[in-house]
Image (cartoon, rainbow, N blue to C red):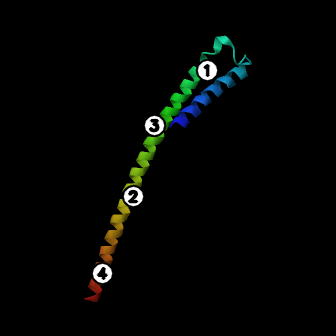
Amino acid sequence: MVHKVLFWGGFGIAVRLWQLGIEMRPLLAKESLWVYPLFAGVGGSFGYWLQGVEDRQLKILSQRREAILEKRRRRDAGVSAVEEAGILAATS
């Protein structure tokens, strides 16, 4: 989780650098140094939120996978029971 927060925090800083580059303003002016932590914080917050979204999606996917596997097990067990009944009926 930390790697996503750090990545998006770094992305926020890169966005600020890009913004200043487009405006052709100095990158490290004393008046605007306080903005870098702000952009990093916003980017890190987005990364934290995105990690939560990913965790919830993985949880839902694993639940659905288990439900599908259970359904297949029940179906296979039902088919086996029907086959056994058919074999017993044919031999009688």
Give whichever of 84, 31 is nearer the camera.
Answer: 31
**Gap between marks 1 and 4 measured at Cα:** 74 Å
* Residue under pointer 4: 86
Q: Secondary structure at mark 2?
A: helix
Label 1 is placed on what type of residue?
Tyr
Q: Which mark is residue 59?
A: none
| Rendered image quadrant of residue 77 | bottom left
Q: Tell me which residue sits at (58%, 29%) in the image.
A: 9
Q: Are marks 2 and 3 in contact (CB under 8 Å)?
A: no
Q: Which mark is residue 68?
A: 2
Above/below status of 73 relative to 84? above
Q: Are marks 1 and 4 in contact (CB under 8 Å)?
A: no
In the rendered image, the residue lying farthest to the top is 31
Q: Secondary structure at mark 1?
A: helix
Give the percent coordinates (x, y) of residue 27.
Answer: 70, 19
Q: Secondary structure at mark 4?
A: helix
Q: Tell me which residue sits at (28%, 88%) in the image.
A: 91
**Gap between marks 3 and 1 measured at Cα:** 24 Å
